[in-house]
Image (cartoon, rainbow, N blue to C red):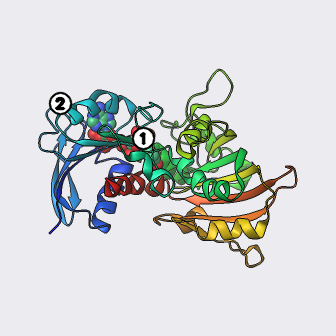
Amino acid sequence: MGKSYHIAVVGATGAVGFEFLRVLERRSFPAAGLRALSSARSAGRSVQFHNEPIPVEELTENSFAKIDIAFFSAGGDVSRRFAQRARDAGAIVIDNSSAFRMEPDVPLVIPEINGEDMKGHRGLVANPNCTTAIALMAIYPLHRAFGVRRAFASSYQAVSGSGARAIEELKKQTEAALQVRQSDGLVLWRDRQVTPQVFPHPIAFNVLPQVDAFLESGYTKEEMKLQNEGRKIMHLSDFRASVTCVRVPVYRAHSIAISAEFEKKVSVEQAREALAKAPGLELVDEPQKNRYPMPLNVAGKDNCEVGRVRLDCALENGLAFWVSGDQLLKGAALNAVQIAELL
Ligand SMILES: NC(=O)c1ccc[n+]([C@@H]2O[C@H](COP(=O)([O-])OP(=O)(O)OC[C@H]3O[C@@H](n4cnc5c(N)ncnc54)[C@H](OP(=O)(O)O)[C@@H]3O)[C@@H](O)[C@H]2O)c1
């Protein structure tokens, strides 16, 4: 029999935490035991793991005794405060937050792309940003074929990317919006609904050209991650990416429209070939039959999908394409469990 591991999930009651438990079950991860950790708010509740109720405990400095692998998914502040405690207790930390991603001695890993980077880790491996991970699943195979130089992208990001409260916010606002009457000019629901709590504006029947906080440059933090994390993951220090991140009223799964420019001459046929054989990615590209990737089709699915592949009419050696992926899975829980499997 192989070795089994004692696992801690920090943020077990959150949107990503829930998926962690399902992914560990589904992939029969060799778990000798599971500790579910949250803030004091959820302590005392229970979560299900392999049909057993697991009591949720408040995260404290002593939570990591005898833990082999600690998955952190409770935000950057919690990771900054507790990841070192977990390492001191002998656990390997796989962190979902942005706290350590750009630290030079912390591997930032998508197993299908740079699993090799985990060699020599020092007890901490970072999981990439969810939009970055899904975009790179399609950009990287094309980079291998043609050498990517730069990309222009717009994201269409699901509300669950902002956690469990954001899912409730979309539900409540949608219920309010459904009361709309044509005689109200189709907009008066705006003023009647509950005040937004998670997002800065109503998200139901709306799109918000803001994900995360604005930087002085005018981009948001989220928008710079494709360039910054992409350089580290692809080992490509000159890679440039200009991104607009948009929140859309979709429950689950992010999509990204990308135009990328390459060193070598591109062809749609070769691009399709490279994408079709890339691990973790499926080519869904039959526009004549209205077949292309969509969030509804990839929600709950491990593989990302890519389609709408065409020569970009505004770039010299460019390809335009569209990729969708479940950000709670490939953008978070699945990728982290794949990292643990590699370890
Ligand atoms: N959602 C995504 O698609 C996604 C994708 C990639 C990465 N991430 C990252 O994953 C992390 C969690 O995201 P989420 O969407 O799952 O958020 P969420 O649904 O809001 O869940 C947050 C979790 O963290 C726990 N938590 C909050 N403050 C804590 C504290 N002080 N001590 C201990 N536990 C605490 C919460 O526990 P309580 O129940 O007690 O509040 C809950 O379990 C974030 O860093 C996020 O950036 C999210």
Give the label on residue 61, or none: 2
Q: Residue furthest bottom?
A: 289
Q: Amino acid at mark 2?
A: Glu
Asked if 222 appears above or below 331 in the picture, the reply is: above
Residue 235 visible, this angle? yes
Task: Judge by depth and name the residue closer to the eye, 36 or 118.
Answer: 118
Q: Position of residue 301 (x, y in %)?
A: 47, 66
The residue labelled by disc 1 is 107
- View quadrant of ligand 1: top left
Q: Residue at x 53, y 44 (%)?
A: 233
- 52 vs 207, left or right, is left
Q: Secondary structure at mark 2?
A: loop
In this orientation, does residue 248 appear?
Answer: no
The residue type indicated by label 1 comes to Pro
Residue nearer the viewer, 317 or 226: 317
The first of marks 1 and 2 along the sequence is 2
Q: Is residue 255 left or right of residue 58?
A: right
Q: Position of residue 40 (x, y in %)?
A: 21, 35
Quadrant assignment, res 267: bottom right
Residue that appears at 34% across and 47% down: 14
Q: Quadrant of residue 325?
A: bottom right
